[in-house]
Image (cartoon, rainbow, N blue to C red):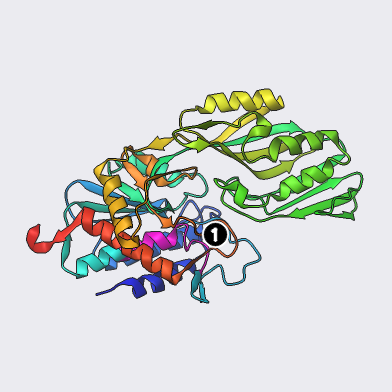
Amino acid sequence: MDNFENAINGIKEFLAVESVQGAPCPSSPFGEGVGKVLEKFASLAHGMGFTVHNEGGYYVTADIGEGEPFAILGHLDTVPLGEGWDHSPLGEIADGYLYGRGVLDDKGPLLLCLYAAEQLLKEGYAPCRKIRFFAGGNEESGWKCAERYSQVDVWPKEGFSPDADFPVIACEKGVLHIRLTLPLPEHVLSIRGGERVNVVMDGCTAVADAPVHAWDVTCTPCKEGYEITAFGKPAHGSTPWLGENAAHKVLLALGEISPQAAQLARALSPTDGSGINCALTDKESGALTCNLGVLSSDNSCLYAELDIRYPVTFKAEEIIKRIEHALSCSVQITGEHLPHSVDVNSPLVQGLLGAYNEVTGRQDAPLTIGGATYARVAEGLVAFGPCFPGEEPTIHQRNERASLGDLRKIYDIYLLALKKLCFKKREMC
């Protein structure tokens, strides 16, 4: 009994639910769309034989089996759909690809795991431990769902989050979201761009009292003076070099008329943190990354929101001091995740790695990433898939997509991993 086609149809149904955080409502503190998609997951898992619990629209758990818990943690909320898609962001198959916001981050992978578990149950396998699915509703906008779980329950000590890369992520850098308060540059009347700090800004607009002439911005007269607009390419905040930041273009253009804007462009444009005295690296986890995700202003101040992913041997306090010294500004922490690592020789890491290598025919080793996954909620958890090495990343970008061939391979990897780590034939249990 192969469940893959059912999984694809199920993913399409979930993609059709726009689950971007919205105003609190009776079904969820994160908005109607999030409440709807969580309830949809609860209904699906219940129909497969899982015991489900909806924690007031914060998250849903789905349990099956008994014994030592094993967690599979994903999320059903997404970043905003964005504009400029070639196919529907609410789910469409075209040219051998499944398009949709969340097809990789993270509706698709979570559902592939759930359908893989159902297939094993139907094939006569039984859980040898308690398998707990956790479907969060606020991963993209603050992790309040995970905070709620920590208040009312205990996280399993082993498991994975299908919300990163293959082969397996044994180390995740620290994450720091900060808000800088700076003087509004001379000749700049206002500036605004970006929606989420963890997304490379794909649009930015400023109003100035004098024109600029940079080739990669538009400058048009407006009531207040001159409106300066630039567009870029979105990407995940943990890989800012893969995007094209519209704010960098606007700040550079404003530098023609404002020395302060030119200084800010030099400080905030480098994605390695060198402009803010934070070009840090270590052997364990690599280099720091910095993304300028949101810009805003009032009559006197400019506010810049940064997403910083820092090496595991450094501390957030040191990074804050470096930025304060470099820019002489106030720094407010708006979000933070401490670094996370798991022994690469642990049975969990080696079991997941073995499943991946067996399906793909590769001999890959564990990785370190800058992304923040639910693996951080407990000491023994790791991230596992769904993105393959060398594949073009489309998470948080327009046209987020996965080929049906890759989805088939992802499904087979999760199926084998669950079979090896969590199931046995019924007569052996």
In this rendering, position of residue 254 left or right of residue 371: right
In this rendering, position of residue 44 left or right of residue 232: left
Q: Residue at x 63, y 41 (%)?
A: 271
Q: Residue at x 80, y 37 (%)?
A: 261
Q: Secondary structure at mark 1?
A: loop
In this rendering, position of residue 125 left or right of residue 410: left
Q: Position of residue 207 (x, y in %)?
A: 84, 47
Near-viewer residue (312 or 316): 312
* 342 shown above or below 88: above
Q: Position of residue 328 (x, y in %)?
A: 71, 24
State the count of labels.
1
Q: Is residue 32 magenta?
A: no
* 4 shown above or below 370: below
Whether residue 101 is visible here, answered yes or no, is: yes
Q: Is residue 113 magenta?
A: yes
- Residue that numbered label 1 is attached to: 394
Locate the C terminus and report the quarter of the image it occupies: bottom left
CA neighbours of label 1 inside 10 A, class few (<14), some (14 to 19), many (20+): many
Amino acid found under the numbered disc labelled 1: Thr
Q: Position of residue 82 (x, y in %)?
A: 62, 61
Q: Residue at x 37, y 45 (%)?
A: 366
Whether residue 148 is visible here, answered yes or no, is: no
Near-viewer residue (366 or 11): 366
| Magenta residues, start to end | 99-115
Locate the N terminus and report the quarter of the image it occupies: bottom left
* 192 shown above or below 264: below
Q: Position of residue 151 (x, y in %)?
A: 36, 39
* Residue farthest to the left, as pictured: 427
* Residue 287, quarter of the rendered image: top right
Near-viewer residue (38 or 204): 204
